[in-house]
Image: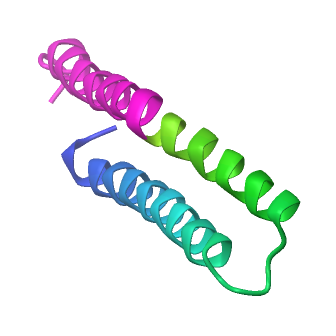
Amino acid sequence: MNLGETYQAVLMLVLIGMIIGVGVLSLDRFGSSGGVDNAASGAINASRDAIGGFASNWMELIVTMIALAIILTLVVTAFVFRGRR
């Protein structure tokens, strides 16, 4: 992996974050609509809270680990292929 290929990894992270954000927003809007009964509203709110917890707790860790893996890969390949070019 070189520096030019990191664009695709960063773009994938942004895309995943956007999909999770749109999912939480659509669940929030759907749960507050008038045509939903109490049981469905409770299920929608529970789903929204579960996804929101994933986005706030785990997404930061996943993004940090992927960013560190990219940086580590760039550093290791720079040292491994230093004498071959």
Residue 46: quarter of image: top right
Residue at the spot 46% in from the left edge and 42% down from the top edge: 55
Residue at the spot 70% in from the left edge and 86% down from the top edge: 34
- Image location of residue 85, percent across then percent down: 15, 30
Closer to us: 12 or 4 = 12
Compared to residue 7, the image places residue 3 above or below, namely above
Number of labelled discs? 0
Compared to residue 51, the image places residue 37 above or below, namely below
Chosen colour scheme: rainbow
State yes or no: residue 53 in magenta. Answer: no
Residue 66 placement, left or right of 39: left
Closer to us: 63 or 49 = 49
Residue 23: quarter of image: bottom right
- Image location of residue 51, percent across then percent down: 59, 45
Bounds of the magenta span? 56-85
Residue 42 placement, left or right of 72: right
Residue at the spot 32% in from the left edge and 52% down from the top edge: 10
Q: Quadrant of the N terminus?
A: top left
State yes or no: residue 70 in magenta. Answer: yes
Residue at the spot 29% in from the left edge and 27% down from the top edge: 64
- Image location of residue 12, percent across then percent down: 44, 56
Q: Residue furthest front?
A: 38
Closer to us: 74 or 40 = 40
Residue 32 placement, left or right of 65: right
- Image location of residue 9, percent across then percent down: 38, 49
Closer to us: 34 or 80 = 34
